[in-house]
Amino acid sequence: MKSKGGTCLPFFSALHPMDFPTFLIQLLNSVQYGLLLFMLAAGLTLIFGIMGVVNLAHGSFYMLGAYLAYSLSAQLGSLTLALLVGALLSVGFGLALEWLLFRHFYKRDHLDQVLLTFGLIYIFEELRSMIWGDDVHGVAIPALLGESIPLTANLSYPVYRLFMSAVCVALALGLYLLISKTRLGMKIRAGAFNRDMAEALGINIKLIHAIVFAIGVGLAAVAGMIAAPVSSVYPNMGSQVLIMCFVVVVIGGIGSVRGALISALLVGLVDTFGKVLLPSVSGMLVYMLMAAVLLWKPEGLFKQ
Amino acid sequence: MSTPTANLEVFPRSVRLVLWLGLAALAAFPFAGSDFYVQMVTRMMILAIFAMSLDLLQGVSGLVSLGHAAYFGLAGYALAFLMPQNEAASLWLTLPLSVLASGLAALVIGFFVVRTHGIYFIMVTMAFAQMVFFLFFDNKALGGSDGLYINFKPTVNLGGWTLMDLDNKKTLYFFTLAAMLLVYGFLRRLLWSPFGRALAGIRVNEHRMRALGFGTFGYKLTAFSLAGALAGLAGYLWGVQTGYINPELMGFHMSAHAIMMVILGGMGNFAGAIVGAFGFEVVLHLFKDLPQVGSVQLGKHWQLWMGSFIVLVVIFAPRGLLGLADRLGRHKGAADE
Amino acid sequence: MSEVLLTATGLTKRFGGLAAVNNVSLTLWRDRIHAVIGPNGAGKSTLANLLSGDLPPTDGQVMLCGADITGWTPERISRQGLGRSYQKTNIFQAFTVWDNVRLAAQSRQPQQPWNPLSWLLTASKSIATNDRATRAIELSGLKDRRVAMAGAISHGEQRQLEIAMTLATEPQVLLLDEPLAGMGVAEAQRMVELLLKLKADHAILLVEHDMDAVFALADHLTVMVNGQVIASGTPEAIRGNADVQAAYLGEEHA
Amino acid sequence: MNSTPTTRRLVLTRSAAVIGAASSGLLLPELAKAQSGKLRVGLMLPYTGTFAQLGVAIENGVRLAINEQGGKLGGREIEYFKVDDESEPSKGIENANKLVQRDKVDVLIGTVHSGVQMGIHKVARDSGVLCLIPNAGVHMATRAQCAPNVFRTSFSNSQPTRALGAAMVAKGHKRAVWITWKYAAGDEAFEGFKEGYLAAGGTIIKELGLPFPNVEFQALLTEIAALKPDAVACFFAGGASAKFMIDYAAAGLKDKIPLYGSGFLTEGMLDAAGPAAEGVMTTLHYGDSIETPRNKAFRLEYAKAYKMQPDVYAVQGYDTGLLLVHGANAVKGDLNNKAVLYKAMETVTIDSPRGKWTMSKSHNPIQDIYLRVVQNKENKVIGVAAKALADSGAGCKMG
């Protein structure tokens, strides 16, 4: 895909070799990006799989988290504190939203859900601009996480990114335990499997749904808050991650948290190495991956 | 997912009346409106064609494509590449080729996507559209992120002699109007054809259709390609009118807006798509032109109004404006008796 | 003097470990009703799905009207001459009764969606289709419900509609999955008469719970338990069969 | 969620009202267009989305310059018309026509986004309306597609980066890696950098690009580390440029491999990027700390008027205003006197906060490009990287 003038990136610039340490570091980058994607996608896939709601506004929750981190850490003077408060706020926000709108849409057509949440994107964007303005903001990294670990002569790895990965792993584990080990998880699975049956068993499906939705929103917001210090906080930051989230969820198989994890890592891998090895098509690679997977398994890697 | 409700396929008198009035208004408009509004309505009609093409999938066949803009944009690009830098090419050449390009793209992509169902279908169509988007966005050879100019309007000659001059805004207006009516007539026809009935059956209960012996894959693929080609017609007209095409025409928002237009008007009867396209555009312009009230510039917050409007429509008028008109028509009827 | 229309040999379907249908063989004759009975979860519906192509068999073979249809898609099998009704009413709720049947009848017209000329025809004006639909609807006794919404008619009528749609495809073999399920006495009676009427020129496989109906109708019975055939033969033979009484009738009559 | 007949009726009447209002709303401006003696100034700028604050800064600048003239142009009262272009290229033509055809503006000022500029430019060329570009640096506007009625007061995408090369080589950084987004602006910025850097005797050992607006830089930073260049030059703008600097620093590259860039890397990003931006060197046609009375006066006046500090975008808007004022005065406010108007604007010397600049034959500023370094959250100007730098204007038939 060479083109006259402008950037003409060699189609396969990997022809010059990548030394082993660099390769390892790229691997690390892939995993780290993948984990962040997972945290975002997990909430989406839960809401998808259990309530069957297509939520285009999920990116807005990510943005909400980032902006919360910005204001709260300024107010409270500590990101950790901001994280806790922000998480609570966003969960509360999720509950309110579920009660006000979403619970009326579980039984509705996917189409209506797409439309509703698309409308919400508009609303959230405008509210964001009214509340926080349109400037770009930064969120300071907590001092004790500010260091970097030297890896090679001139490259070092920021501790904070490791911290992010750690949080993501922790959340992944937490989710796994919650869903497969706890009573609540049992009920959630029952609800996802067959809501009538679950109701017959005397499970308060309404409550379950509310909780799951709130968790989903919370996850997205936390992802936003965790990412804020490295991503900085700016308008429309939600819409950019949204599509990537959907790709992850769909590749993984809607509703499967495990699938989301695997596919997030996969996407991280493809995106990272794509940029280095196939720069000229890196924009399309992830979507090619998704298309390929769905042609092979029309319902994603881990169909529920 | 809810069980699909019956589409409003046959119009009650009230709705038919509204449509005829609308048509009359459209025919008369150029003699009233200024150039700007003539162009604006032309654009709305182009979007109406685009929306109708999507309705064939979304409303009739129950295939919600979140990537329909790809085929809209492709035809525009086809026109841009077919149009020489310093002379005008003929419509007889560029129109069929552009529409064909979109149709073929839809055929190829459709071959993969119509295998998937429900939300997966929504997502895969989106994914393929994104691929097309980035293909053009990332490659300077294809115009890159800034897009391409189309320096001339195609010529419409018969023999030695010019049929019409599309540079004339009114001419282009009526040309587009004709195209829109043609597409509408064609799709209405198709709706009642065995093909159309089969698509409706697929929307309501594909599994049963297969058990009855329908090769649904062929039906869906044909519908997908046909819709792509018609979207291409719209995209071609867009390119002719604006003379400038860019990747955003294939973007996520373009696709989402089309979905919205179809729902806003009412699905599965094509008239709804037209009403929706006009409604959506008018409302958007209205919100953006809202006046200053006190210290607040209402227009500045158009996103808020637009978003709320969409949410309200989904909640109160899931069957769209025509659906509403129909419902109220019936209420009236009941009251009269 | 009747002919064999469908033979299944060694049909097996495994989901992961367990075999929902295990090495089942049966033969369907024109002019005979062959009933498959068995307790819930015996694999009756799975068997039906294997025959109609809704599920591909793990093992075994199915011959329909002289063709090996093993692994065919449902639509192809349907066009080969097998018509099926579903246990869980499976109709086009959003259409009228007539449109349901007409659409079913349309499936027997040449199908060429990609042919632009076919886009300009009017479906409801196809004489061949309408005749087929009319016959089916009259046969199934829904004549005066044509204009009703399929979603709105009584359960019994919906079961009839299921049959009507199946008949509209003019099948050789009828595969009826619990056509009597949830019917009132009168409705059931009408259905039984209908089946006897159809028997004349169809081979019928009847998956049914209603014992009285089964013994009244069936010429041949196959009893399934846990995916396996434990007995097969005439109603009399089955009545006398000890295993069957143990495994099934006992529980049923208790 | 089933709605009662009453709500349905409500909604119908409501939507009916909407449509009605809409149609009337559509015709209103038409009526309002009774040809007043006022000079109609159209502002087509982003007021929503990523570039919203740029739009505001530019409008402020324009108004400031015009208010200095008592809010008049060539003695004529003026009326402003605003359109939010949403930075949405697919609506560029439509929005430009709103101003040109509906509001019949005498001058169209816009915009920020290059893609949208393409649309405006098309309309400007077709309608011949005077068009002033306060930011978008897309090359074609003052090159192949240049037009007598289109003037740019900001920069061409390759202008700031063209000045980078000399400065970098002067610092002994002869082997550089270039990184940017793969989109038109990035390509054009690279063109400038390449010419300048090669001319100065540097070599570009690798050119990295990632899809717009992807902000996952880690992979490429790793590659940069492996390549071990003397320096890195980049073009990024908007929110993501802060992230780039943060990531660059966090990867420990900042102290090992100096980071250079087009000035847009740091404009308005210093709070967001914090310490990560310290020491980053950029070239731009403006710097907040230019030590001239002119700049000081401007900054004071702007701060007074709008209760905020001006940035480069405000300056560009301000200069757009100055240019318009100059032109309008030359024709006593009769903007239809095009020959005189254009002549005046072509021969103008704008006494701008960024320093005096003149108009090139292709209507792009011939201006000094400053070398700036970030010191305690400020773009400190440490010299002139290139004097009176002009864009090539390649392919422009004018003049």
Image (cartoon, grey):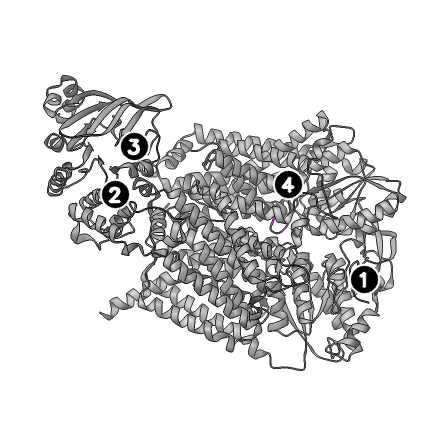
Between circles 1 and 2, the one closer to the viewer is 2
Disc 3 marks which amino acid?
A: Asn
Q: Is residue D178 above or below residue B297?
A: above
Q: In which quarter of the image is residue D333?
A: bottom right
Q: Which of A162 and C195 is in front in this view?
A: C195
Residue C49, numbered circle:
3
Whether residue C118 is in magenta: the answer is no
Residue C207, numbered circle:
none
* Distance CA(mark 3)–CA(mark 1): 76 Å
Instruction: Tell me which segment is drawn in magenta.
Output: A226-238
Give the residue number, with chain letter if any, for mark 1: D365
Residue A281, numbered circle:
4
State whether residue B290 appears in this view.
no
Give the residue number, with chain letter if any, for mark 2: C169
Disc 1 marks which amino acid?
A: Pro
Between circles 4 and 1, the one closer to the viewer is 4
